[in-house]
Image (cartoon, rainbow, N blue to C red):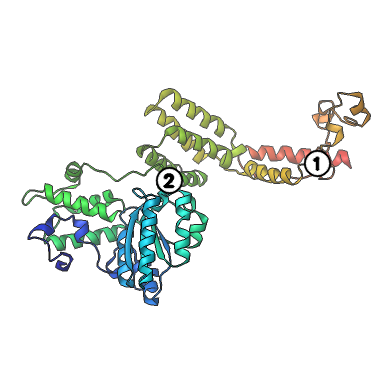
Amino acid sequence: MSDLFSPHEPPGMENRRPLADRLRPQNLAEVTGQGHLTGEDGVLTRMIASGTLGSMIFWGPPGTGKTTVARLLSGQAGLAFEQISAIFSGVADLKKVFESARARRMSGRQTLLFVDEIHRFNRAQQDSFLPVMEDGTVILVGATTENPSFELNAALLSRARVLTFKPHDEASLGELLGRAEEIEARPLPLDEDARASLIRMADGDGRAVLTLAEEVWRAARKEEIFDAAALQEIVQRRAPVYDKGQDGHYNLISALHKCVRGSDPDAALYYLCRMFDAGEDPLYLGRRLVRMAVEDIGLADPQALVICNAAKDAYDYLGSPEGELALAQACVYLATAPKSNAVYTAYKSAMRAAKENGSLLPPKHILNAPTKLMKGEGYGDGYRYDHDEPDAFSGQDYFPEKMGRKTFYDPPERGFERELRKRLEWWAKLRRERNG
């Protein structure tokens, strides 16, 4: 690994460079953890072999090699490399980069423009890339930690291929640590459990695992070996929590919702606690639990909505952390309740019908006739007051005449909706009998 050091650096200076920088790959084959992109049959490997590169968006969490891979691509494809960050750049900076790229192209060399945090550019700034992408002035490689579908213009996405960078798994993080030990010519002073704990702390971030390793080496005395508890004390760090504005937030709430829907209270509690621990707003979680009650439980257990609203109010009253227990109770109740999306499905079907038949008037017999004119037009004629009918049921048709009778709500044979189904079947039988 000595070829990673610059021959122009003064003696000893190489050890002052961060470990992550000293371990930076020199070609695509050395990139760790992204075999689907940089391996022998990886997408980017095939692109390089074909001799052509197109514009791309690199989407993935921090520390997965997006910047490094962009540099390697430009080098292996013989392209000029320009890098800007959307955090520190504006329209004037973009114009300068585009002008340089045009001049370079005139001399026969194309530019790979790497834009870090590209999602931070506004829509107009993102649109400014389109002309230089289309005429070949630049090959754009944008890097983002955010979901491109939500953060990037459709026009930009239509001209660039989205490639997903995966978080490092335990094996690839372990490989990075092994390479670090090789370059340092000394093992990490950690026992087996502590080593596994350090890998978990990195949370899939290659840069983080190397930074943590450096902290351990700095802290260790001669012959000292840290266990997991000592490691925690030394680095004062646990696994990073998600940014509530990024994908981690949506991934965990999605996982929580699916665990509730899948009737797994243990997994649901785990994800709920993950979000509490990450600093999520408990009232946001309360609102999501209410949503789950109406979408996935519905009338299979009408108490679900009542309990979720009560839990939300209890948190509002008690605050944190005591109120979190009320939300946990609601979460377990939802996960263990009978499930039904019958009302949810019925609502969507009824909404479609309302949009398609929104101009149809209700039948005249169920309309009031407050004036003589309206009475003369037949408003209210033939209406039968259900409370005066046998079984308090008239069996009249209430849909617009041109629409005909429709069925939207189809309760399953589960929970309280089993009882509702019996009622609906009984009324359907009476309706047939009374309307011939």
Q: Is residue 41 visible?
A: no
Mark earlier in primary sequence (1, 2) = 2
- Residue 24 to residue 317: above or below: below
Is disc 1 placed on a helix, strand or loop? loop
Image coords of residue 389 (percent x, y): 84, 29
Between marks 1 and 2, how big is the CA–CA gap?
Answer: 44 Å
Badge 2 amino acid: Leu
Image coords of residue 182 (percent x, y): 15, 63
Is disc 2 placed on a helix, strand or loop? helix
> Badge 1: few (under 14), some or many (20 or more) residues near its Cα, within 10 Å?
few
Q: Which mark is residue 360?
A: 1
- Residue 149 to residue 137: above or below: above
Q: Is residue 62 visible?
A: yes
Quadrant for the N terminus, please.
bottom left
Q: Which residue ends up furthest to the left in the rendered image? A: 222
Q: Which residue is mark 2?
A: 252
Q: Nearer the viewer, residue 305 or 168?
A: 168
> Badge 2: few (under 14), some or many (20 or more) residues near its Cα, within 10 Å?
some
- Residue 95 to residue 335: above or below: below
Identified at 60% across, 38% down, the residue is 298
Quadrant for the C terminus, please.
top right
Identified at 41% across, 73% down, the residue is 52
Q: Nearer the viewer, residue 144 or 6?
A: 6
Identified at 35% across, 72% down, the residue is 107
Image coords of residue 255 (percent x, y): 45, 47
Image coords of residue 184 (percent x, y): 13, 60
Identified at 25% across, 51% down, the residue is 208
Q: Which residue ends up furthest to the right in the rendered image? A: 376
Badge 1 amino acid: Leu
